[in-house]
């Protein structure tokens, strides 16, 4: 196992990279990849390979890989499928450790493509080379700065991504980036002619930069191995899976896409549950639950306390919690007493705690509900990120007055956020924050994110995140 | 009926507005509302009422409403509940036509609050005054520029909103604004002591600015009237409803929020279906389906043609379509032949049409699938808004080259968009566009939105929108 993992290391942290099919034409993948490799200052060397060019993006180009004067750890192949075998032969001659094949037109197209794929892989095997793809869109490692796929805005962080589909994988990364968290490593596995999802999971399980593993899977090459691994890994790192091919029509689309056999969905679903894998239905949920696992404690039960600025949100959140099997238990007389002291008489006197617009009561309400024994997790709706943008067109003195007022409100929210960090640590209960206003300009929300607490857009999304956390917590409690 | 509608007109298009409880203190609703009323140049006059101030936001303040020297059509009440009856008496004396009561602490708190509410309403009734609320957060009319609630970014458009909950209503408006569409009128109905959701629906059904009606409902005061109305209205204007209080816990939260009786959810669900009301489960779906109804034709069947740049998206979209009861039928031999002429040999040769990254083939593929008899609606994934931002840190000549290349790609997308307008008109089939890249900077996506075609974030969201459109189309076909 260690040696296998070592070989995958060359993929993510090579000392030198060659691009077979590098190009000066922006219409080509070979241009894209080169431009990503030379953009930042990095520790690895880059060798473009192209018989027709002298120089590509400021780097000397070589006609063949074997012309490169120094060692090459890792090569990317982006030339048509019929030339791939010859390129792989050069890789073997050059003692390259790992190769990533972007090129499509192999097994996923059947017939001749399948034969070409076998040939390329058998050359790689005899040369001891591990192969990503073919028919994939690249990979990245934020700690070495190696990007063979897009990732301009990607920041380092604890989430590792494995995706059968390159487009889909890129999509997960973009959504996560928009949510605000960072990534450790990413790989699109494509046809998996050599390295498979199972291999990457084994690798990421050992990878210190990766705390959470997300995978988009069209089909498992070795389901037994996957679930054995999953059972072991999910106890220390959560695995979140989006498994496609749920319908017969989806399965046949998966076959023509990455030559994957989707398998029985019901069987997979049961196996995911039994091995603690968090199965999601779409990317939005994957990103939401991943972000919640970064810093929040795992809840010890399913009893939700809801604190809301507006009653409508409380109603909808309660409906959604109940639908998802979460409890929204009544408050004890003692808790109601304590809340009576800080809330106006028109508050709901019940869970959900509708503060009836008194956003300044949030600090006290959240503190009270967190210390209540009968509550395992708190859903906070619109208490943070509540302060709106300053409207345009006001008379100057009014604008000034409003600005000062907003400043005071923001300071209140910042105190609330500080308090949350302390309370989450003290009570070891997750606090799921939903912020329905525009969040891009909110300082308190940015502060939460810096700490690793991300916010959700709707009360329904918040409830959904809680239900995933509760299920994972139940699994962990059962499996010990 | 006409006279009733006329009275509601004074609410949305008054010649003069009084704010009873106007304030110079930014911590007060009376400040908020005043600041919204005076911000823009409008045709109506504004009279702040406050016994302690000489002037509020540049307007002369009057001690009592009866001191205002001119007629007042519409008054907002934002003073504590115990003073509301006296304020309503002044409104009656002044022959005000309609009153909106922001103040909470009435029937939703039970006991004394309920008595106060009865008193206020009986004064209003004897004065012939129609009342919004109490316990609401205001309303707006984009055509008259009257905003008693937030709406800085709101633009005029065809969507009218009625919401039991003020916070929730504001949330719908913000989400719609983010999606890119505009609104006609908005009202938060609160406790509905006088005017009810049924009244507002009747009004918006006749309102020329409103083409689509969205409602957040905690409980119906007169379910029979609602469904009679809905049956009539949904034939000419879609009604989209988010009905809360689905669970017993949610229902009791609704009771303490707006004193609403939620009623049996199963009964409501059946009645919504039988009257053509589009029932959604959350605001994201409400905004998505509303945006699709603005300009897209209603599909004549449930057969979906999928065109995608990446195979993974196609797999997930197919799964979701099937799950939602939509067909993803095979392509005819003839269609495959035609697509063979414009796509590389590695394309999927099936529906979903995976163009295998050849985004420039989108124009031809979409045209071909639209004219196919066996397809009722087209789902386009990532063909528009595909061009990424220009990455930073490239050498100058490379950046220039890439910039020109992107420019060409954007021009291709703009042509595709032009073609879509023409084709949607010609074939009368909806084309649902999902754009997974960041859409904020995409010219082609902005062009679509200007025309009234909005984009969706995920393939799953696109499929969901289609399933709502198909259900509504089925209802309309059956009900004629």
Image (cartoon, coloured by chain):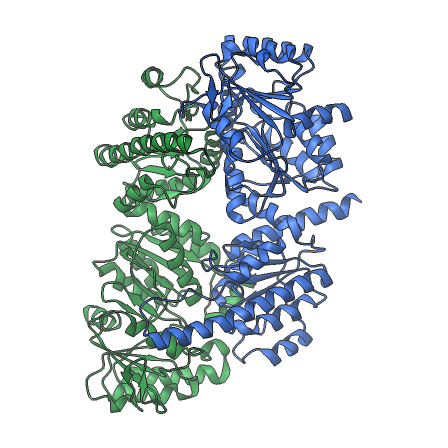
Chain colours: A green, B blue
Q: Please, which residue is most extreme toward the right here?
A: B480
Query: Looking at the image, which residue is at 28% across and 74% down?
Result: A38
- Residue A228: image quadrant is bottom left
Residue A202 position in % (x across, y down): 27, 63
Q: Quadrant of the C terminus of chain A?
A: top left
Q: Is residue B422 above or below residue B453?
A: below
Can the viewer see residue A165? Answer: no
Tell me the quarter of the image containing the N terminus of chain A. Answer: bottom left
A155 relative to A118, above or below: above
Q: Residue at x 60, y 48 (%)?
A: B291
x and y percent of residue A364 in the render?
30, 24
Residue nearest the observer in this picture, A198 or B18? B18
Which quadrant of the structure image shows residue A447? Answer: top left
Total tally of numbered discs in the picture: 0
Residue at x 67%, y 56% (from the top left corner): B302
Query: Which residue is more in the foreground, B344 or A333?
Result: B344
**Left or right of residue A375, residue B23 in this image:** right
Q: Name the spot of residue B184 as percent of width and height, x first.
A: 63, 39
Taking depth in this image into account, of B29 and B122 the one nearest to the observer is B29
Give the quadrant of residue A470. Answer: top left
Residue A153 in view: yes
Say left or right for B92 vs B259: right
Q: Position of residue B120 (x, y in %)?
A: 59, 11
């Amino acid at each position: 196992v260690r040696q296998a993992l070592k070989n995958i290391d060359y993929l993510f942290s090579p000392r030198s990279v060659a691009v077979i099919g590098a190009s000066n034409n922006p219409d080509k993948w070979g241009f894209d990849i080169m431009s990503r490799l030379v953009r930042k200052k990095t520790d690895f060397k880059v060798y473009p390979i192209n018989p027709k060019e002298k120089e590509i993006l400021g780097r000397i180009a070589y006609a063949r890989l074997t012309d490169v004067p120094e060692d090459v750890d890792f090569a990317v192949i982006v030339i048509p499928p019929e030339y791939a075998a010859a390129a792989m032969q050069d890789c073997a001659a050059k003692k390259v450790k790992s190769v990533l094949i972007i090129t499509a037109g192999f097994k996923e197209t059947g017939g001749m493509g399948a034969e070409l794929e076998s040939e390329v892989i058998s050359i790689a095997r005899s040369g001891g080379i591990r192969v990503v793809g073919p028919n994939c869109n690249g990979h990245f490692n934020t700690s070495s700065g190696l990007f063979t796929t897009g990732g301009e805005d990607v920041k380092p962080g604890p989430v590792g991504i494995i995706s059968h589909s390159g487009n889909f994988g890129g999509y997960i990364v973009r959504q996560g980036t928009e949510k605000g968290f960072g990534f450790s490593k990413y790989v699109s596995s494509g046809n998996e002619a050599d390295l498979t999802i199972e291999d990457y999971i084994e690798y990421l399980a050992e990878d210190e930069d990766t705390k959470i593993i997300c995978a988009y899977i069209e089909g498992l090459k070795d389901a037994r191995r996957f679930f054995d691994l999953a059972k072991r890994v999910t106890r220390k790192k959560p695995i979140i899976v989006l498994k496609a091919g749920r319908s017969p029509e989806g399965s046949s689309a998966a076959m023509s896409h990455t030559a994957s056999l989707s398998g029985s969905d019901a069987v997979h679903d049961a196996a995911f549950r039994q091995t603690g894998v968090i199965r999601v239905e779409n990317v939005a949920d994957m990103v939401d639950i991943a972000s919640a696992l970064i810093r929040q404690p795992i809840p010890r039960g399913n009893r939700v306390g809801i604190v809301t600025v507006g009653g409508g949100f409380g109603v909808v959140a309660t409906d959604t919690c109940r639908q998802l099997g979460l409890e929204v238990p009544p408050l004890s007389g003692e808790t109601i007493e304590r809340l009576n002291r800080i809330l106006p008489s028109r508050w709901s006197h019940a869970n959900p705690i509708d503060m009836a617009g008194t956003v300044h009561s949030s600090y006290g309400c959240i503190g009270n509900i967190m210390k209540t024994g009968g509550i395992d997790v708190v859903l906070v709706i619109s208490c943070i990120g509540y302060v709106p943008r300053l409207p345009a067109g006001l008379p100057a003195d009014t604008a000034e007055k409003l600005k000062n007022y907003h400043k005071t409100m923001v300071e209140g929210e910042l105190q609330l956020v500080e308090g949350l960090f302390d309370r989450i640590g003290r009570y070891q209960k997750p606090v799921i924050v939903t912020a329905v206003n525009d969040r891009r300009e909110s300082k308190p929300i940015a502060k939460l994110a810096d700490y690793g607490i991300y916010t959700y857009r709707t009360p329904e999304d918040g409830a959904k995140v809680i239900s995933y956390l509760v299920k994972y917590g139940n699994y962990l409690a059962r499996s010990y």
